[in-house]
Image: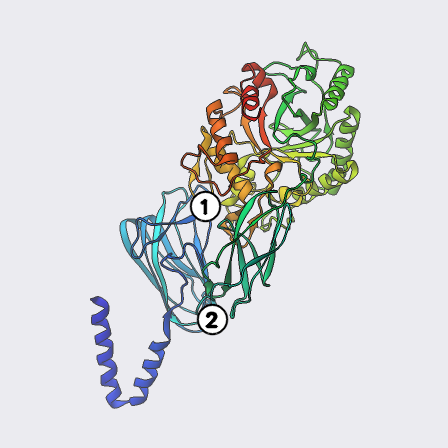
């Protein structure tokens, strides 16, 4: 009603003016006719198309109008901002409006070329309209509009966001959906795709099983990092400055059988049990001789090699002294046990780092020292390879280092270089594994480094560039699904330790891939399932997040058979999932080998 009354008033005024000055009537009508809503998908009816969100999803209830609205949940270091950049006219007036619910919800515009604006509400238990105006600068053609909550508060909702003013000089409509999508070359780990060009498209987004995995400018793409003998579905959208088209018709492809990936994994069993052996210390679990480790353990990580100082790069492996471990074997017995394990087809690695072993390769000198000292340990004991268990403050990202595919932070770049050097030195059979915490991997779905606006923990997602750079050399990634806070999964819900749901959601992220920091144009590709093992504590004594054997079985059923999944829906089924990792062999022995027995019973 209000809009109708206002329109009548304006029309009456224009009519009166027109009787005296006809030219002004024509000019005003033309100016009003040029006004339009230049925001894309402001009602969120097309999901998050057009928006970049750090922690957002769409919901069907509550909504202000239509069938969808935005819901985003701030965290301690993230205000859950959703933003889009729109094309505008220079020196023009715009009105930004939207409806919000929740506490401390903001709506604003930046890059206006004049004074950036924002408006907010402290509390909106029901839908409340926010509105503000601005004028663009003389040379401004792009403006970013955004909505966000406040750090650590509850979820907020937003809907029907509009930016009304003169339309920009560029394209005002998203392109049509691509046609003619078909597969080309299919291998055991990749699928080639091609499609017909779309008029007005500036790029194309490729989706695998509903998840965006690539953006290209041409009409073909190759999706890699796939599992052998596995069926996948693909779709493509066309993109221009106005937004993204609807998805194309889907095509499916099944990868060919493969003979295993790189990284020294071809002679591991199809399903492997990985465990850490307390080799340099004793604790409440007691010391276990290497020769006494049962044959069920396929990969044994000797814990730990530690640096002489945080930044030296000089790694030393000091076996547990007899004063601390009265039943410790001699060096000769230890080396003989390594050879016996290897003769039985097992892999024995040196694990670097751990909770107390902070390693920061800040210089090339430290990098080179790391390579030489680790090589010395491997050669001295005749080991099969290396496990990287960098925790705490070993890895973090410098401000401005925002692309996991092209890292610039020295501790990251130098670690990648060191590991590639070791791989090249020891060859194809060199086993390389990593055991990061969830904070450094899956947390990268929400946060990466200090973030575009600063203020985040720079360690967020800091393992991602290392994993990505070494994915062709990596034998196993077994993220520690324990001692973890809540982590957001691909369903945009937080998952906490204590049940199968957490392990399923965290592993699904590794096998599906995910946009880093919510950026759909910056997707961390999936790992092969034969590269992934799930890290769990062996007992309640071993760490927070222990789950019962029944929950372990649920986890494996869901990921390898897509049964027994509970409330979480995975993005695939991975019968080739490599297996399980646990901290630790010693704690499992203390618990009467419960973890090992459950693994053996499941995989036979």
Quadrant of the snapshot with the N terminus: bottom left
Disc 1 on helix, strand or loop? loop
Task: Please say whether residue 14 is visible from this viewpoint.
Answer: yes
Q: Measure the alpha-carbon separation of dots 2 and 1.
A: 33 Å
Q: Please tell me which of labels 2 and 1 falls first in the chain.
A: 1
Residue 171 disc label: 2
Disc 2 on helix, strand or loop? loop
Quadrant of the snapshot with the C terminus: top right
Q: Nearer the viewer, mark 2 or mark 1?
A: 2
Q: Residue furthest top?
A: 326
Residue 78 disc label: 1
| Relative to 238, residue 507 above or below | above
Question: Cβ–Cβ below 8 Å for labels 2 and 1?
Answer: no
Residue located at (52% from left, 41% from top)? 509
Q: Is residue 309 left or right of residue 250?
A: right
Residue located at (30% from left, 52% from top)? 63
Task: Please say whether residue 284 is visible from this viewpoint.
Answer: no
Viewer-closest of 26 and 152: 26
The colour scheme of the drawn protein is: rainbow
Q: Position of residue 434 (x, y in %)?
A: 63, 34
Residue located at (79% from left, 38% from top)? 425
Viewer-closest of 433 and 278: 433
Viewer-closest of 563 and 459: 563
- Say few, some or many: other residues with alpha carbon within 10 Å of mark 2 (under 14 / 14 to 19 / 20 or more): some
Q: Position of residue 301 (x, y in %)?
A: 66, 26
Q: Is residue 192 left or right of residue 118?
A: right
């Amino acid at each position: 009603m209000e809009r109708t009354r206002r329109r009548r008033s304006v029309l009456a005024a224009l009519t009166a003016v027109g009787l005296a000055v006809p030219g002004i009537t024509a000019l005003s009508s033309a100016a009003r006719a040029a006004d339009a809503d230049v925001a894309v998908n402001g009602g969120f009816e097309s999901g998050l198309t057009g928006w970049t969100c750090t922690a957002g999803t769409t919901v069907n209830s509550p909504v202000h109008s239509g069938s969808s609205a935005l819901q985003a949940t701030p965290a301690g270091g993230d205000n859950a901002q959703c933003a889009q950049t729109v094309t505008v006219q220079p020196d023009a007036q715009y009105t930004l409006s939207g409806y919000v619910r929740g506490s401390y919800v903001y709506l604003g515009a930046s890059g206006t070329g004049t004074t950036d604006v924002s408006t907010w509400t402290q509390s909106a238990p029901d839908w409340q309209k926010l509105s503000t105006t601005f004028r663009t600068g003389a040379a401004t053609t792009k403006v970013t509009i955004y909505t966000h909550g406040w750090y650590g508060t509850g979820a907020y909702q937003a809907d029907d966001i509009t930016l009304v003013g003169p339309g920009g000089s560029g394209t005002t409509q998203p392109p049509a959906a691509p046609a003619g999508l078909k597969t080309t070359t299919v291998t055991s780990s990749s699928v080639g795709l091609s499609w017909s060009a779309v008029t007005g498209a500036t790029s194309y987004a490729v989706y695998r099983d509903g998840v965006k995995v690539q953006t290209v400018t041409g009409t073909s793409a190759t999706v890699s990092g796939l599992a052998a003998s596995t069926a996948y579905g693909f779709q493509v959208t066309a993109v221009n400055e106005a937004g993204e088209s609807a998805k194309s018709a889907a095509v499916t492809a099944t990868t060919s059988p493969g003979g295993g990936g790189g990284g020294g994994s071809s002679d591991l069993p199809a399903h492997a049990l990985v465990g850490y052996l307390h080799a340099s210390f004793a604790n409440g679990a007691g010391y276990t001789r290497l020769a006494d480790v049962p044959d069920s353990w396929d990969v044994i990580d000797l814990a730990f090699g530690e640096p002489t100082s945080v930044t030296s790069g000089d790694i030393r492996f000091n076996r547990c002294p007899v004063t601390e471990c009265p039943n410790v074997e001699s060096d000769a017995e230890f080396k003989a046990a390594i050879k016996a394990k290897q003769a039985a087809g097992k892999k024995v690695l040196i694990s670097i780092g751990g909770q107390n072993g902070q390693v920061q390769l800040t210089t090339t000198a430290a990098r080179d020292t790391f390579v030489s000292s680790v090589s010395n340990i491997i050669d001295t004991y005749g080991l099969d390879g290396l496990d990287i268990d960098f925790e705490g403050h070993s890895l973090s990202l410098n401000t401005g280092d925002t692309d996991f595919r092209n890292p610039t932070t020295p501790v990251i770049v130098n670690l990648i270089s060191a590991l590639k050097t070791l791989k090249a030195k020891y060859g194809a059979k060199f086993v390389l594994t990593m055991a990061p915490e969830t904070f450094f991997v899956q947390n990268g779905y929400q946060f990466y480094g200090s973030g575009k606006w600063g203020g985040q923990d720079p360690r967020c997602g800091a393992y991602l560039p290392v994993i990505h750079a070494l994915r062709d050399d990596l034998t196993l990634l077994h993220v520690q699904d324990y001692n973890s806070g809540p982590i957001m999964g691909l369903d945009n819900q937080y998952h906490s330790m204590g049940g199968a749901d957490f392990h399923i959601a965290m592993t699904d992220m590794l096998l599906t891939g995910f946009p880093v920091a919510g950026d759909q144009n910056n997707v961390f590709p999936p790992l092969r399932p034969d590269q992934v093992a799930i890290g769990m504590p062996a007992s309640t004594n071993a760490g927070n997040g222990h789950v019962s054997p029944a929950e372990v079985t649920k986890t494996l059923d869901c990921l390898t058979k897509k049964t027994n999944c509970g409330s979480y829906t995975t993005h695939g089924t991975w019968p080739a999932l490599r297996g399980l990792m646990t901290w630790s062999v010693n704690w499992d022995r203390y618990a009467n080998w419960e973890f090992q027995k459950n693994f053996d019973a499941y995989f036979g």
